[in-house]
Image: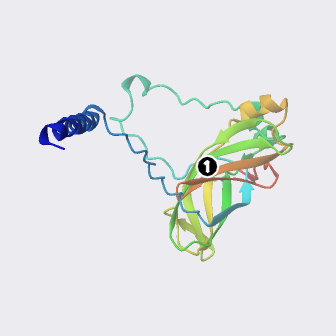
Amino acid sequence: MDAMTLRGPLLALSILGLASGCAGHDDKEGKAPTPVATTPPSEPEPAAVNVKVSVASVQLQDDCPSAAPAKPTASDKPAESAAEPEMQQEKDAGDVAPGAAGRMAKGFAPMCTQSRVQLSIESDGDEAQSFAIREVRLKKADGGDVLSTMSTREPSLWTDSKYTPWDESIAAGASIKVGYALGDPDWGKVGKALGGDTWGPMYIVEIDVEIGGQMQTVASPKVPRDEPENIVT
């Protein structure tokens, strides 16, 4: 076979190979690469807080002043109110214990006993945890809607047979009792919701607490609203 005979098939093969190479090059240049699906890293689950809280006791009595307020100076008093007599705010019927008005008229004055809640806290964790009360709700003992909310203040730690100020930190492995002063619920609102006396029914105090960023809800045993004690004046 002479050279002229071979030249035709070789030329055809060269053209086909060149066309094939160009087609592959065009595919690589013209098409975007297929994106690779990636799974975003999942956020780690928060570590479980091994702290158990329970309500040890509740007293529903009075919201007493923590300390005597400082007497206002002349510069603190508005000029227009300096000559006005002090007005005694009248209490709603739901705020006065049965028979209290009569006893006060006979020379008895009610003692102020601060409403309080005491909590038991048991920690099985290896790290200290922060603690905070987020909400306190007063409810009827037999269930139903919230009657009123209550404020808290003065966190304290029971130690050496007395309460001392507490920084709301739970040490690792601690077993402690802490207390808070409770503000009054809206007893007028409670009386309207109950349709009568606020001194007879039993209540439950429900508390939302936050420990190490995690929420817990605890409830007290059934408790009454205690009638204030009275002293002879």
Report the colour scheme.
rainbow
Question: Looking at the picture, how far across and down is residue 165, in whole percent?
Answer: 51, 64
In terms of depth relative to the viewer, which is nearer, 115 or 230? 115
Identify the residue at horizontal 60%, vertical 77% (top origin).
160
Residue 189 shows up from this direction? yes
Of all residues, the one furthest to the front in this rendering is 1
In terms of depth relative to the viewer, which is nearer, 101 or 218? 218
Q: Is residue 20 left or right of residue 67?
A: left
Q: Is residue 9 left or right of residue 42?
A: left
- Residue 90, relative to residue 6: is it above or below? above
Tell me where residue 161 sits by quadrant. Answer: bottom right
Question: Looking at the picture, how far across and down is residue 159, in whole percent?
Answer: 59, 74
Identify the residue at horizontal 37%, vertical 41% (top origin).
35
In terms of depth relative to the viewer, which is nearer, 142 or 40? 40
Which amino acid type is shown beneath numbered disc 1?
Cys
Question: Mark 1 = which residue?
Answer: 64
Question: Looking at the picture, how far across and down is residue 19, in whole percent?
Answer: 23, 33
Question: Looking at the picture, how far across and down is residue 45, in whole percent?
Answer: 54, 57
Q: Quadrant of the N terminus?
A: top left
Tell me where residue 174 sits by quadrant. Answer: bottom right
Label 1 crowd (10 A; few <14 / some 14-19 / many >=20): some
- Residue 87, relative to residue 43: is it above or below? above
